[in-house]
Amino acid sequence: MLCNRKVHRSVAFERFVLVALLAVFGFERTFAALPPAAEWIPKNAVISLEVSNPKALLDMLTGKEATAAVTALPAYKSLMSSAQSQELLTMIGFIEGTLGTDWRTGLAKLTGGGITIAICPEEIFLLIIDAEDEVMLGSIHELFLNIARNDGRGEELASIEGVTAWTFNGKEAHTIIGKRFVLASSAEGLKKVLDLRDKGVGENLTSKASYQAARQAAGPDSAATAFADLSLLKYVPEFSALLEESGGNPLSALAFAGIVEALRESSWLGLGLDVEQSSLVLRASVDGKAGGSSSSAGFALPKKAGQGVLPNLSVPRRLAAISLHRDLHEFYAAKDDLFPERTSGLIFFENMMGIFFSGRDLTSEVLSQAKPEIRLVLAEQEYDAAIGTPQVKLPAFAIIFCLKDAEEFDIVAEEAWQKAVGLINFTRGQQAMPGLIIDRPTQGETRFTVAYFSAVDVEDKSKLEQRFNFRPSVAMPGDYLIFSSSDGLARDLVDALDREMKSSHEALAGTHSALEIDAEQVASILEANRMTLVRGNMVKKGRTQAESEAGIDLMITLIKLAKQLKLSAGTGKDLTQAKLELSLNF
């Protein structure tokens, strides 16, 4: 009997130990930290977006400075007074009351662990949100599930991979595991995600070599990163057509050279978003590179170390500026390979250039004179009250070349420009329309040529015709050649180039394209043309004046929130890279 009791005690103790061990391991399995969300994304994902630091973005876009800047705008008060906005505010207030916190704090707690989005084959869309507050996540889920149930759409689904799942609309399927909310566009998609929980790392997105390379290029400290499998995207007809679109258009090929070709040669695209004070900085990298002796984009790439675009020029009222590294001689010499089909537009261009440049060979005698550094400037105009103001105020634009032999080519460019003005006058004369008058003013030490329309016979000078936006000019300070649509911009560029020639300036090494847009000045010219834009919106979209005014004002308001946008593209670290920087007004 004693022996039996010892046996029973031994068995009971073993059972207790077994139950305890199961409980411990079960507890660890249930409450152990979840792996990174990317490890729950299938390996065949085509696109993924990971916001690893949502708070940094929320602090910038919803912080005190941003809120003050937005609420101070006149359009904000008008927007908030609408019935739709009031309904939205009521809903937000209700959610705040349910969660017991304000919406900013609630949003931070619900997303603070990160947000991951992925698009996979078979039209599967995935969303994974890691919350900081598990109780709040459950509360907000119950709230929206009850709303969906009241509409007859929300319900609990059959268990998927041993996990309770729900749907808000009868199509998507989602679940909550600890602090993690997982949603898929279908129950099958959710099953694919849950299948990965027990599989090795070789089955998920993080094991993909292209994904790893894209993440490394994006940088480890980015607030958000994105990955695109270009080798798969190229099978999408729309994306493939986009890459080929610039092939038959000379201007597109010239502007986007080096970028499109690099995308064609790449297997992945990586993006990294950083928050730097009041700026958002987006860096893009692809593993393909344009270049080489057989490259169709070789004319766009710096050939030697240290070569690249020149800094963009700064002038008063500047809207935008572009600096390009493009060898026009090399580009046009390869035109038969780049554009095997000679379009009517290309033939017309060649014929006109032959007239303007007196039969000189466009490749060897004209374009060969231009250095690869090309700059363009767009600026809002300041009109002379003595001349008048056009009703529609168009921006002035100019292109600036740097010449190899200015002394030899200046007179050739001047003659070509005057022939172009003469052709315009001849054409307008045939139609009994006023022509352009040529003058030779001086700016600083540079004498330049301008052609203008006379407003002497115009009675109402407050609403001049659109043609008065144009005062085409040609100026040649130093080794530079300026073709401008207005003498005002030509003068400003002469001054800017004079300052540049007196100071030291270096090329942006490895960069072949650089764009700057001054948002505040863009908002200014839109405001100057507000009523013209409103009338155009009414005609094109059939809206009332009040609706059109509200839409245009909202667009201007949104633009005012930005200060400047900068975009550059080039090569480095055996990758093709681009950088976009958006500075905000708060």
Image (spheres, rainbow, N blue to C red):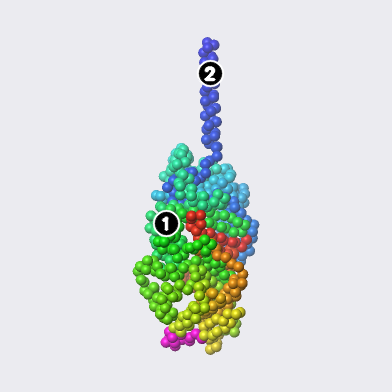
Image point (44%, 80%), residue name: 356
Q: Position of residue 218 (x, y in %)?
A: 52, 52
SS assignment at label 1 = loop
> Bounds of the magenta span?
425-437
Q: Which residue is mark 1?
A: 265
Residue farthest to the top, as pictured = 1
Image point (61%, 50%), residue name: 105
Depth check, front residue: 579 or 506? 506
Q: Quadrant of the C terminus?
A: bottom right
Do the numbered discs 1 and 2 sit on residues whose CB atoms are within 8 Å? no
Q: Amino acid at mark 2?
A: Ser
Q: In the rendered image of this protein, does residue 557 appear above or below residue 408?
A: above
Q: Estimate how packed mark 2 is, as few (under 14), some (14 to 19) or many (20 or more) residues with alpha carbons within 10 Å.
A: few
Front tag of 1 and 2: 1
Q: In the rendered image of this protein, does residue 12 appear above or below residue 404?
A: above
Of the two numbered discs 1 and 2 on the same chain, state the one appearing first in sequence: 2
Q: Which residue is mark 2?
A: 10
Q: Position of residue 582 (x, y in %)?
A: 57, 61
Image point (42%, 58%), residue name: 264
